[in-house]
Structure formats: structure tokens, C-alpha cells
Image (cartoon, rainbow, N blue to C red):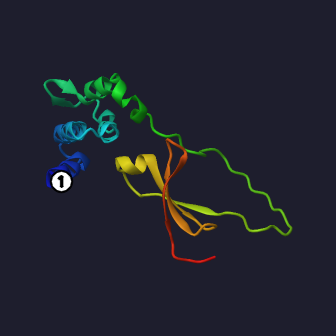
């Protein structure tokens, strides 16, 4: 099954054959629903709006499939994308003085399309506790931690 999912991911990403990409998205969503992975099914289906007029299956377009999923209560928590911080203007000022070291946290981002897990979670490095953390953006809490092997 894993090989089939990998091939479907490749077909979903290609742009030459939009109906094929749409069918790959629809099939991936069904596989994830069968696995009871509603979050994965919803985030996979979120790419359907890029194919709104493309007929995918049984005369239904990408928009039709997406709207059906959006009306299903099982998927509502997963269809809204987490809000991004920022996007506005930033203004910097200089302050002189002696400031104590405080906790620094570095967040790592992927380049390219996020997989469902990484749409919800972020990988961060906490320099104060010397730990790598997996932060759950929906629950707004640390989901897992691992020490870096550095003693303070």
C-alpha cells in the first residue's frame, strides 16, 4: 500500500494531466479515510480547489468533491488552515543596555508542500532546555521532546 501511496503523491503533484492529478487526490483521500486518518484525508483534499473545474470522477469536479468534504462534520476541524503569524510590516528600533539571555526557540520550516503532519506540527529547537520539540499548533502545546545530549 505504501508504494501505491507514493505513486499517487507523485501523480498528484504533476501538472501535465490535471484529471489524473485530481483522481490521484481523490484516491489518496479515500485511502486515508479507510485508514481513519481524517486529518490526512482533509489536507490531501485541500489541494482540490486548485482543480475547481477539472472533472475528476463521475462527472464531479474538484470543487464538487471539496464542497462535499467541507459539509461533512468529521472534516471541519481539519479544513481550516492554521493562521500564519505576521504578514504585516515590521519596524525595528535600537535599544542599548545590558540584557540577560532569555529563552530562544528556533522553528524549522519545510520548503515546498507540507505533508498533513507538518501542517499541524512544527519542529523547534529550544536553546534554554537543549531540546528538540514537536509543537502541535492546534492544541498549542508541545507534543514531544527529545534531549540534544548537551548538559547545561
Q: In which quarter of the image is residue 18?
A: top left
Residue 149 vs residue 111, the one in the foreground: 149
How far from the left and from the top, in percent, is residue 21?
Answer: 20, 42
Question: Left of 102 or right of it: where is 124?
Answer: left
Locate residue 100, reporting x and y percent. 78, 68
Q: Which residue is drawn at 61% across and 66% down?
A: 129
The residue that appears at 15% across and 55% down in the rendered structure is: 3
| Camera-nearest residue between 77 and 11 | 77
Q: Give coordinates of residue 41: x percent, y percent.
A: 29, 38
Compared with 45, 5 (above or below) is below
- Which residue is identified by label 1? 2
x and y percent of residue 66 in the render?
30, 29
Q: Residue at x 63, y 44 (%)?
A: 88
Q: Residues within 10 Å of mark 1 (few under 14, many from 20)?
A: few
Question: The residue tagged with tag 1: helix, strand or loop?
Answer: helix
Q: Quadrant of the C terminus?
A: bottom right
64 relative to 92 in the view: left or right: left
Task: Give the quadrant of residue 85.
Answer: top right
In the rendered image, the residue lying farthest to the right is 97
Q: Nearer the viewer, residue 151 or 63?
A: 151
How many numbered discs? Answer: 1
Amino acid at each position: 500500500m505504501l508504494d501505491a501511496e507514493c505513486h499517487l503523491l507523485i501523480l498528484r503533484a504533476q501538472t501535465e494531466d490535471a484529471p489524473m492529478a485530481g483522481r490521484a487526490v481523490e484516491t489518496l483521500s479515500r485511502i486515508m479515510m479507510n485508514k481513519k486518518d481524517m486529518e490526512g484525508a482533509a489536507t490531501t483534499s485541500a489541494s482540490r480547489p486548485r482543480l475547481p473545474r477539472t472533472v475528476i470522477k463521475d462527472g464531479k469536479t474538484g470543487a464538487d468533491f471539496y464542497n462535499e468534504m467541507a459539509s461533512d462534520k468529521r472534516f471541519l476541524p481539519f479544513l481550516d488552515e492554521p493562521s500564519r503569524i505576521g504578514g504585516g510590516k515590521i519596524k525595528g528600533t535600537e535599544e542599548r543596555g545590558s540584557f540577560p539571555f532569555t529563552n530562544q526557540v528556533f522553528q524549522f520550516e519545510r520548503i515546498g508542500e507540507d505533508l498533513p503532519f507538518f501542517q499541524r506540527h512544527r519542529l523547534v529547537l529550544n536553546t534554554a532546555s537543549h531540546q528538540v520539540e514537536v509543537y502541535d499548533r492546534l492544541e498549542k502545546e508541545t507534543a514531544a521532546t527529545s534531549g540534544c545530549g548537551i548538559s547545561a
